Amino acid sequence: MAPFGMVTGTAAVPVRYRSTALPADVLDGWRALAAGDPGGSWFSTPEWALAWWETLGTEEGTGEITVWREPDGRVSAVVPLLRTWRRLHPRAPLAVPCLTVLGSGPGAADHCGFTVAPERRAEVAAWLGRRARRATLLLADLDPEQGGVLPAGAVEIDRTPCPRADLTAGPDALGSRRFRSNLRRYGRKLAAEGVTFRWVAPAVEDDELTERTALLHTVLELHRQRRAALGLATSFDAARAPLHLRLLERAAATGRGEGPAFLVAERAGEVIGVLYGFRWQDTFAYYQIGWDQTWAPLRLGTAVIAAAIRAAADQGLTTFDFLRGTEPYKYRFDAVDREDVSWLVPHGLSGALLGLKYRAKAARRG
């Protein structure tokens, strides 16, 4: 694999694809480029973008993926875009057209953006600028290192904290002394009740999909039950199952051992808790959790997260990414915010209205 940013020749040739049927060498080149990007994430891989397009994209708008290839055939930039509509208010039917990052929005992707070698960023930024002359660009939840591909006129409209914990010192170094003591105490109580934990790695073969498919449905149901008990709604429901089932399939097909993984809590052969997320490079991104509320007095939810952190560290991963949200429990594990940034490149009336929407949102928060 060529080092990230190594570009030969002087001209890269952009090719636009309007379906998920990308050539195999393009997919391999995209994966290699994403793997070498220090600011990349699972949400920048072809597995996420294409699974999202296949399951949610047709309902949301019209997708396209533009790929820059060097004279020697190597992929040096990938820009997935979606032509869609965005509501101006959740309870109002009025929506305006825009271009956004394909794979963002529904499905709750974080660290979105484009995979671009450093030497091609100025070229891609200029290309996006030309697109913005005809349509508003709404680039939501971009990784903070995406600044180099932003076209002129981009305006910051929002920031989303995404806490992450550094695992390099080991899981036993995370949190206060009192918090670690409480984890051990409740861990002993759960063990006395016969509760065990196990890690289920990303599938690398199709015959491993059966168990992981069952676990996906279990975490969806346990999550639904827990949210209902709290009187809360959720977007991680049966309507999102096709996306995550396709992610399981696409990740297994690569045979790379990356993608959807699970931390499972069991008692007497029954699954009572599941944490679901994505292993990619040196990071585990914690996506969602579900657990039996009857175990709340023994802090089962916190114990599942702690077990997932330990499993990630045991595998040599260096970052546990809690993704978006500032729930207090994340900071008990010494998580530190890394902020995704949303940008608007306005064009015409749609740009003016979207700009007004986000300024009003900022005013309400402030």
Image (cartoon, rainbow, N blue to C red):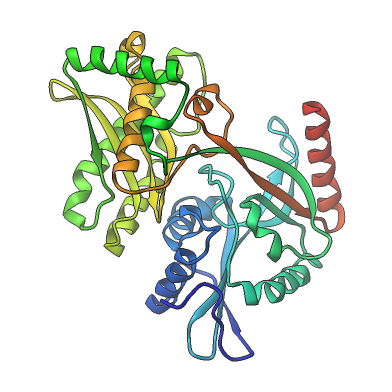
Q: Determine whether, in the image, residue 361 is placed left or right of residue 52.
A: right
In the rendered image, the vertical position of residue 283 relative to residue 119, given as above or below: above
Which is more toward the observer, 43 or 337?
A: 337
Query: For the point 34% across and 47% down, which residue is it?
Result: 260
Q: Is residue 7 above or below residue 251?
A: below
Residue drawn where x is 46% and y is 26% of the image = 175
Q: Position of residue 194 (x, y in %)?
A: 16, 17
Nearest the viewer among 356 and 7 is: 7
Which residue occupies the foreground of this view, 75 or 117? 117
Residue 21 showing in the rendered view: no
| Left or right: residue 189 compared with residue 22 | left
Q: How many marks?
A: 0
Q: Is residue 266 above or below residue 361?
A: above
The answer to whether 4 appears left or right of 184 in the picture is right
- Quarter-of-image position of residue 149: bottom right
Q: Quadrant of the C terminus?
A: top right
Tell me which residue sits at (32%, 35%) in the image.
Answer: 310
Q: Quadrant of residue 239?
A: top left
Residue at the far top in the pictured view: 297
In this view of the protein, can residue 171 be seen by the observer?
A: yes
Front in this rendered view, residue 123 or 84: 123
Indicate the position of residue 271 as horizontal and vertical percent values.
22, 26
Residue 287: percent from the left, percent from the top?
44, 38
